[in-house]
Image (cartoon, grey):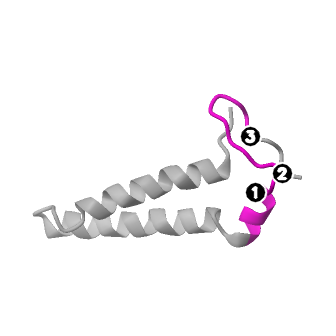
């Protein structure tokens, strides 16, 4: 089973938010910096997945994701 790229982008957005909440709350400054760097890497990957040209190919009037069903093939 493969995951649709926009689903993956949504999951990454959740990771990004969680990492963002942790940054600044960790006492160890080195770990804090590493968490912030990881958040930046996750953000960059999410943005690459969501690039407008890719989004236009994967969305449209017939696009609908349903849990348990494979995503439709972009037309």
| Residue plotted at (66% across, 52% down) | 5
Mark 1: secondary structure: loop
Please give the range of residues in magenta.
53-70
Of circles 1 and 3, the one toward us is 1
Circle 1 residues within 10 Å: few <14, some 14–19, many ≥20: some
Residue 54 x %, y %: 74, 64
| Residue plotted at (62% across, 67% down) | 48
64 with respect to 34 (left or right) = right
The single residue placed furthest to the right in the displayed view is: 75
Q: Are marks 2 and 1 in contact (CB under 8 Å)?
A: no
Q: Which residue is mark 3?
A: 71
| Residue plotted at (70% across, 71% down) | 52
Q: CA distance from mark 2 to mark 1?
A: 8 Å
Count how many numbered circles sit on residues in the image.
3
Q: CA distance from mark 1 to mark 3?
A: 11 Å
Sequence-wise, the earlier of marks 2 and 1 is 1
Sequence-wise, the earlier of marks 1 and 3 is 1
Q: Which residue is mark 2?
A: 74
For the stretch drawn in magenta, the main secondary structure is loop
22 with respect to 65 (left or right) = left
Residue 3 x %, y %: 65, 41
């Amino acid at each position: 089973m493969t995951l649709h790229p926009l689903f993956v982008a949504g999951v990454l957005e959740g990771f990004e938010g969680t990492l963002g909440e942790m940054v600044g709350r960790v006492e160890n400054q080195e770990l804090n910096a590493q968490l912030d760097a990881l958040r930046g890497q996750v953000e960059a990957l999410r943005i690459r997945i969501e690039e407008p040209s890719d989004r236009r190919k994967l969305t449209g009037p017939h696009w609908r994701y349903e849990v348990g069903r494979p995503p439709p093939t972009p037309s």
